[in-house]
Amino acid sequence: MKERLLIFLRGLFMGMADIIPGVSGGTIALITGIYERFIFALGSLSPAFLKYILKGDMKKAKASFMKMELGFLITLFAGIITSFLILSGVIEFFMDTQPSNTYAFFFGLILASAGFVYRYVGKISARNITAGAAGFIFAMLFVGLGTVQSTHSLPVIFFSGIIAICAMLLPGISGAFILFFLGQYEYMLGALHGIEITVIAVFIAGAVTGLLSMSRFLSHLLKKHKPVTMSFLFGLMLGALRMPYENVISNEFTPLLVVISGAVGFASVIMLEKFAGNLDR
């Protein structure tokens, strides 16, 4: 029970991290010591046991089923979903009533999280600089595509689910950040808070597709090309700061409150990392 509770708490912190565009759920998994287990558990998901059941080979079906850490994943995702349900309405409220201060808070979150990603870049090299510059330029240009950001069709929601869940697997970049980046963040918050079944179901379908198809690929990237991957993510996050900045200056704001909100966001990432990292101590 203690182990299940600790896994559930990790899920709560991962969900908290992923519903705000700052530090990622992957980061929380990394600093709480379950990242490799999380990736392995996702990679072990396979429908092979169903094939053995259909063949009547229950022994192989049981062996195949037991290889999947379903208990671990179910407990972890229960914590993640709980955070989503609790926080979605709170964040939506602040975005409606205090847009400039909320986006300043997001600016601080993303900036601090980018600093965390930079720790994993390693030594400065031509490849890392090129990857970082590519991420920065891509983000700056993509954020300016207002027509893409305003699209909320079901195919776009499905694709957003795929990309967001892939971000959740990477230490350093959150699923919420990707939704924010794609212009789907406020829309999905509203869908969660309003329990729009169709939108949520399509997003979950995309997320499941991303989990099943991308977990091994992302694991390979981190194992074989970690510095370049993290350099690209670092540049991506810095470039995407354009979005919260433009949202701050496009609304009425008090400079002092905006600075305070950004500082609180920055400090929140540091505190969350330290607190989550002490779960087992």
Image (tube, rainbow, N blue to C red):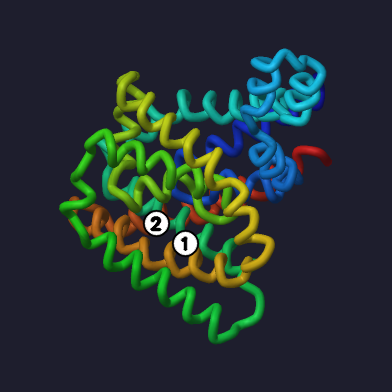
On screen, 256 above or below 32? below
- The answer to whether the residues at label 1 and label 2 have Cβ atoms under 8 Å apart is yes
Residue 174: % across, % down: 49, 48
In the figure, residue 10 lies in which quadrant?
top right
On screen, 252 above or below 60? below
Residue located at (23% from left, 53% from top): 253
Q: Tell me the quadrant of the picture where the N terminus can be found.
A: top right
Q: Which residue is mark 2?
A: 107
Mark 1 lies on a secondary structure that is helix
Residue that protrudes farthest toward the front in the picture: 55
Q: Which residue is mark 1?
A: 111
Is residue 17 in sight in this rendering? no
Residue 129: % across, % down: 51, 81
| Amino acid type, label 1 | Leu
In the figure, residue 187 lies in which quadrant?
top left
Tell me: 254 left or right of 106: left
For this rendering, which residue is in front, 51 or 158?
51
Residue 145: % across, % down: 21, 59
